[in-house]
Amino acid sequence: MKILVTGGAGFIGSNYIRYVLAKYPDIKVVNLDLLTYAGRMENIRDFIHDSRYKFIKGDIRDRKKVQQVMKEDFDAVINFAAETHVDRSILEADSFITTDVYGTYTLLENAKNCNVEKFVQISTDEVYGSTDKRSFKEIDSLQPSSPYSASKAAGDLIALAFYKTYDLPITVTRSSNNFGPYQHLEKLIPKMIARALQDKRLPVYGDGRQVRDWLYVMDNCEAIDTALWKGKPGEIYNIASGNEYQNIQIVKFILQTLKKPESLISFVPDRPGHDRRYSLDTSKIRNLGWRPEHVLKDALRETVEWYIRNKWWWRSLQADKFFQSDTSWLKRKHL
Ligand code: NAD
Ligand code: TYD
C-alpha cells in the first residue's frame, strides 16, 4: 500500500503519518509539503529516517511538480495541504485562495490523469458556518464566514465535482477543531498554554462564549483512515467528538491544569466575522464504526504536558506575530 500525503509536515498531516506508520507495517508514505511557516521539519523528525517514508519539498500549486510526484503509482492521495489560520486569512487571503482552491484543483487534475484509486480531501466544519441550536449534517448548505472557510468550501466543491464529472473517487472529511502535539502556537490551545507558562496575558476574543467541538488529533487521524478505507466515493463525512465547550471554559481549564491565576485572562475586541458555534452531526462516520477514543479533559491535560516537555519544539515559534500580539493586527486593518 502506497499513499501520497500532502501537507504532511503540518500539525494534522504529521500526526497522520505517525499514525499510519505505526498501524501498517508494509505501508509506503510520500509526503509532499512546501514547508511554509506552518510546515516544519521538527514535526517529522522522529520518522524522517524510516525506510517506508519519503519527503518531497514542493508546492501543490506547481502543476509540473505534482505531475512528476504522481508518476509514482499511489493507492491513495490524502490532501491536508492548506493555509489554515482564520486570523491570517482576514489579514491576507491570497495564499488561501491559491493553495486551498487552486492547489486542490491541481492535485485533482493530476489524480484524474493518473487513475488514483482513492482521494481524500481534508476539510473543516467551518465550511457550514455558524449554528445556534442544531448540528450540521453533510447534506446541509455551505455558508462560510471567513476567507479561510470560503476557500476550503471551494476546494470541497471542486473535489466533489471531480467525482460527479470524472468519476474520481473523492471522499471529503469535515472535522471540528483539532488539538494535540505539534500544533502551531497561532491556534487557541497551544497559544494559551505557551503564554500562560510565561505568565503572559491570554487574549480571549469578544466575550469568549464562542463554542467549538474539540477533537483530539489522533481521534481525527483514525477517523480519516476509516473514511479512506471504508468511506464511499462521492461521500462527505463529518468528524467530531461531541465535546462542545466555550473558549473561555477551555482557557480556564488550561489555567487550572497549569495552576495559574484566571487574572491572566484578558478580553480583547472580537475577530471580524467570528462564528459563534460550530456543531456537527457525526452519525455517518459513526455508522462506519468510528468512535473517538480519547476523553477531552485527559487528552487536553496530556497536551499541556506535551508542550511543557517540548519547549524545544515551540521556542522559535514565539517570534510569530500571531502568538505575540492580541488584536493589534485587528485594530490596524479593521477598526
Ligand atoms: P497546518 O497549517 O498545521 O499545516 C498545513 C501544512 O500544509 C503545512 O505543512 C504547510 O507547509 C503545508 N502547505 C501549505 N501550503 C502548501 C502548498 N501550497 N503546497 C504544499 N504544502 C503546503 O494545518 P493543519 O492544522 O494540520 O490542517 C491540515 C488540514 O486539516 C487542512 O486542510 C485544514 O483545513 C484541515 N483542518 C484543520 C483543523 C484544525 O483544527 N487544525 C480542523 C479541521 C480541518
Ligand atoms: P483558532 O484556534 O484560531 O481556530 P478556529 O478559528 O479555526 O476555530 O480559534 C479557536 C477559537 O478561539 C475561535 O473561536 C477564536 C478563539 N481565539 C481566541 O479567543 N483568542 C486567540 O488568541 C485565538 C488564537 C483564538
Image (cartoon, grey):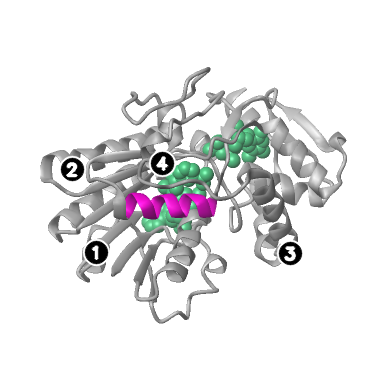
Which callout, 4 or 1, points at the residue further toward the start of the chain? 1
Q: Secondary structure at mark 2?
A: helix
- The N terminus is located in which quarter? bottom left
* Mark before the other along the chain sequence, 2 or 1: 1
Mark closer to the chain start, 4 or 3: 4
Q: Nearer the viewer, mark 4 or mark 2?
A: 4
Q: CA distance from mark 2 to mark 1?
A: 17 Å
**Residue at 41% across / 28% down in the picture?**
128
Up-down: is 243 above or below 271? below
Q: Tell me: residue 317, above or below residue 287.
A: below
Q: Amino acid at mark 4?
A: Arg
Residue under the point 34% across and 31% down? 138
Instruction: Give the residue displayed 31% in from the left and 38% down from the top.
Output: 236
Viewer-nearest of discs 4 and 3 = 4
Q: Is residue 102 magenta?
A: no
Nearest to N terminus: mark 3 or mark 1: 1
Main structural element of the magenta stretch: helix, strand or loop?
Answer: helix
How far separated are the C-alphas under marks 3 and 1?
A: 37 Å
